[in-house]
Amino acid sequence: MSNYENQLNKVKSANGFIAALDQSGGSTPKALQLYGIGEDAYQNDEEMFSVVHQMRSRIITSPAFDGDRILGAILFENTLDRKINGMNTASYLWEQKNVAPFLKIDKGLDEETDGVQVMNPNPTLMNILKKAKDNDVFGTKMRSVIKSANKKGIEKVVAQQFEVGKKIISAGLTPIIEPEVDIHASDKAHAETLLRDQLLIHLDELTADEMVIFKLTLPEQPNFYDSCKNHPNLLRLVALSGGYTRVEANHRLSLNNGMIASFSRALTESLNDQQSDKEFNTALDTSIQSIFDASCT
């Protein structure tokens, strides 16, 4: 079988979760600060991305980071251009760790209108998808944000996600569709109802061989997205931590049977640049095991 087919089998049926290591230019300074590295450690974006790559490399090369508990890892495009132990990052993930690589492909968010932020235009999308395919990347991730239960806005978010998602499928990759509902939205539960309705409409419009992954905010009502999870066109239902602490995110996730994690901040919240390798690996192992356990309910 091809690498893609092996990755597909793993992502579709194995136990585990997807690690989100795709902090972009806007979110990297905060991620580094939480890791114990201040903005005085770098002078420009290139130096910043080099520093955050060191953090990601430390996570990925840790003995705790393994394919027995982690199905995939989402990378930022800059990370795809860099190496780990002399290997292309995506190749290292699959060949050394048995972890399927995903690539963040969106170009950030537009200004809020109709209670949502759609994705910015991405004129280089097809070039990025070719680059991902050439690097044996399995899938992609793209994020929109829903701030309130505005039906028009939510319809717009989901339509855009699926429009781009079909282009990703045509390029031979599997898209993670991520319409995040803001955890602070006062009408979060209503927004989730409107979102679920739209997701099901668009799932029904896919052909039999068009498969997608949903990455959704942990819902107010446990098992709320079961109708999506059981749809034949949904490869996997995954959850974002969305600002919840790891303890809270794991608790909410454990109430949603068959939903698995794709956490970023919740995965790395106990890690620090000043930790010894032993301390770092122990903290990462504890984090990974707790998220794995919550993903196996």
Image (cartoon, rainbow, N blue to C red):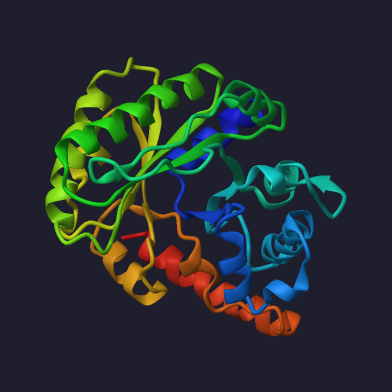
Q: Quadrant of the C terminus?
A: bottom left
Name of the residue lying farthest toward the right: 86
Place of residue 137 in the rendered image (x, y in percent of width and height, measured from the top left): 63, 35
Q: Quadrant of the N terminus?
A: top right
In-front residue for pair 199/52: 52
- Please tell me in which quadrant of the rendered image residue 85 appears: bottom right
Q: Is residue 119 left or right of residue 42?
A: left
Q: Residue at x 62, y 47 (%)?
A: 76
Q: Residue at x 55, y 70 (%)?
A: 268
Q: Is residue 112 left or right of residue 89?
A: left
Place of residue 198 in the rendered image (x, y in percent of width and height, measured from the top left): 20, 32
- Look at the picture and state if 284 lies above or below 114: below
Q: Residue at x 73, y 55 (%)?
A: 45
Place of residue 19 in the rendered image (x, y in percent of width and height, measured from the top left): 53, 56
- Please tell me in which quadrant of the rendered image residue 135 appears: top right
Q: Residue at x 47, y 54 (%)?
A: 17
Place of residue 238 in the rendered image (x, y in percent of width and height, measured from the top left): 37, 49
In-front residue for pair 193/223: 193
